[in-house]
Amino acid sequence: MKHQTLSAMVLVLILLATLASPAIAAPKAPLHEAARAAAILINHSHTDIAAIPAYWIEQAKANLRVFYAHTSHGSQPVTGMQVLMSQTPSGLYDLTTDGSVQPGALSLDDHYGDMGDLGHDGDTTWADLTRSYLDSHPNINVVVWSWCGGVSDNTVEGINAYLNAMNELEQDYPSVTFVYMTGHLDGSGVSGNLHQRNEQIRAYCLAHNKVLFDFADIESYDPDGNGYLDREADDGCYYDNWTRNWAQEWCAAHPGDARCAPCDCAHSEPLNCNLKGRAFWWMLARIAGWNGLPNEPQKSVTPMLAGHGEMVHYTLLVQGLSAPLTATVHVTDVVPAGLAYIPGSLVATSGSANDSLAPTLTWSGTLTPAPVVTITYAATVTASSPQTIVNQAVFASPGYPTITRSATLLVNGRQFFLPLVRRKG
């Protein structure tokens, strides 16, 4: 997908900008963040609802209890979610908006207007309201607040007040996931204050492994990945000095597309709301535990760079096979030369894992009732020279196509780092 990753130089510049701004205390990792190895940044690349395994939608519905406070602009994701619910007779995307817990539905306590939004320059009234709410609703484990126009006229210090208040909430309520948000577009383009303050929020979330719903980025692109921020797009999807509208143009070129379904989208076009509703589900699936990868077998290694004598961990996901969920699946993984398997480290969330023939490791089982099985094991680097070690795993079920997945590890390689100099004072 387009624009999904930042180049190394852009990342360095963003981090430099963060270091140069007035100081924010680095957050201590709450319990629920300690296991999060990277930020969850939800943007225009995360609107393909079909890419989310149904299992993780169900997990989100079963396990998440969401509080969402906003005013008119913030209603857009909920509007889009309601459209998607009406388009899905199976009930996969069902939700309640009054906070009630019902079987097969996401519990979303939607507060439209009665508690306000994230306010303006340095106002943290919303944080006090959050504390009062959480103290009386101990079942809530996801909190979302949206901006209205409060980022457009904000300052570096004002955004820092927002970030610090979020950090304090995370420390005081470690079992709750707090979702950060950028502000909606205002037509000021890449040079405007809105974009600069949104970049400040993005940099902080990226550096500190936060969950960010990038409201502005989602309304900066059409579904084909064409961007309009540099053409002064606004919250209504107008661009080129209000002479054109990317949402209207895209839907005119794609008649009948479900993402163009009509709805009362506050301040904007139906396509914008429908994309945000889909992105909101993507975010919830990630919070529920989905790794964001396609619904197919996966293999990965962490870290991807290691030296002689260091330990690495491999993870295999058994999912998305063409065989029925009740069919027996066999996984074979041979630990290659240059690595030494650590005895007893092979474990799986279900099924039968066997390391008696190490370095040949095997697993067998079915993908029911949980259609995703996670297999992990550890190894020590024994290679002493710089080299690339490719490790393959084979996923097989009799009578169905065999799938091979690999993970690449660079050992004993030199690592270069661009120096970052923190400003004194």
Image: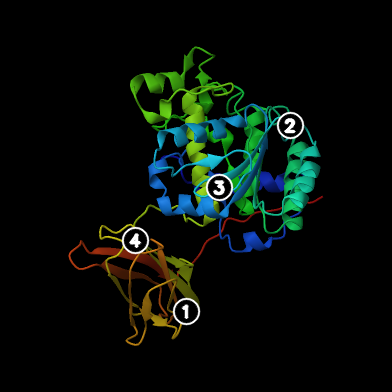
Dot label at residue 102: 3
Task: Specify the farthest residue to the top.
Answer: 243
- Residue 356 location (% of width, % of height): 35, 87
How packed mark 2 is, by other alpha carbons closer than 10 Å (few <14, some 14-19, many 20 or more), is few
Tag 1: amino acid: His
Q: Which residue is mark 4?
A: 297
Towards the viewer: 421 or 322: 322
Front tag of 4 and 2: 2
Q: Earlier in the sequence, mark 1 or mark 3?
A: 3
Q: Which residue is mark 2?
A: 114
How packed mark 1 is, by other alpha carbons closer than 10 Å (few <14, some 14-19, many 20 or more), is some
Residue drawn at x 47%, y 74% as measured from the top left = 312
Residue drawn at x 35%, y 60% as measured from the top left = 319
Left or right: 306, with 122 as reference point: left
Tag 3: amino acid: Gln
Task: Determine whether the residue tagged by mark 2 lies in a helix, strand or loop.
Answer: loop
Q: Earlier in the sequence, mark 3 or mark 2?
A: 3
Front tag of 1 and 2: 2
Alpha-carbon span between mark 3 and mark 2 = 24 Å
Q: Decide: is 242 above or below 182.
A: above
